[in-house]
Amino acid sequence: MSSDPSLNRSPLAILEHHQTPLLPLAAAAAAGPGCISAPSPSSSVLSREYRKGNWTVQETLILITAKRLDDDRRSRGGATTSSDDPSTAPRSAEQRWKWVENYCWKQGCLRSQNQCNDKWDNLLRDYKKVRDYESRTAATAAASPTSYWSLERHERKERNLPTNLAFEVYEALTDVLSRRATLRAGGGAAAAPHPRALPLPPPPPPRPPPPAQASVSGEMTPEGSSETEGCGGGGEGSPSPLPGGKRRRGLGSSVVRGAAELARALIACEERKERRHRDLMELEERRLRMEENRTEMNRQAFAGLIAAVNGLSAAVHSLVPDHRGSHGR
């Protein structure tokens, strides 16, 4: 990993460093999505000359910031109705990308909404490739694999990885996607309807003491007995939902199990690759041995043929003087 101090700076700090006149807008973005006013219609009506060519790192960070603010606006729009706050009302995808274009235009990124959309899709594709590669690298740390950030350009190309993804862009995308996942989880919990509290019925009459078998089963499953008592005490009302802490613990355990299963799958895949490589090497060695045997057989055959020809030639030469002597007599 490079020790360049610029890699440790946040994307917002990089924007503030490279674009000094836009400090009020950056401060407003840090204060919250509600502080960024919607672009005026006159700014979108005017004809714009969009910039072509490759995206710079600064333009990419501006686009990522715009998407983060757009996600914040959408989450606020889901929590309030359009009558309460028209600026946060749900909008179509085209309107959202137009908002992203206007924001980027204000920050000096002269790109169209189609360019922003295409660039965002490419960024997500490259980010997923690098994230999956880094996950595999972390899972197989014993084999001393090379991190993406330590690879040269040609090495990244050989591994079918993006060749020009900057580290600050990767960190900014990680922040945006993690915030998006958090907002979705929070929005789903907020949108879930709360069960209406029902009036409690009068307490039931005292029950007779349970038999011994029931007491043993109750001792074996204390959680089940407590849940049964809770349902009986509530009458026909539905049981209360789990507390937030238990939900979070359950979610954390699910994430841990998923990560463990992913690591096992990656290890099994690597083992299968290694086994397949060994099989290929054995086949190659067997083929080489067969080629050597065939070459040796051909050599011996040629040697035998040469010996036979030499013997035949010697016999012919021995017969020639005898034939001449018989004619002379």
Image (spheres, rainbow, N blue to C red):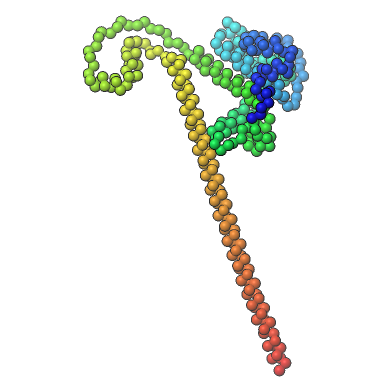
Total labels: the figure holds: 0
Residue 148 is at least partly visible in this image = yes
Residue 119 is at least partly visible in this image = no
For residue 300, above or below residue 40: below
Quarter in which the N terminus is drawn: top right
297 left or right of 241?
right
- Image coords of residue 279 (percent x, y): 53, 48
Quarter location, residue 221: top left
Q: Nearer the viewer, residue 83 or 121?
A: 121
Furthest toward the bottom, the residue is 329
Q: Which residue is located at x 65 percent, y 34 percent? A: 151
Quarter location, residue 16: top right
Q: Nearer the viewer, residue 191 or 302?
A: 302
323 left or right of 291?
right
Q: Which residue is located at x 60 percent, y 20 percent? A: 176
Q: Which residue is located at x 62 percent, y 23 percent? A: 171
238 left or right of 174?
left
Quarter in which the C terminus is drawn: bottom right
- Image coords of residue 210 (percent x, y): 23, 16
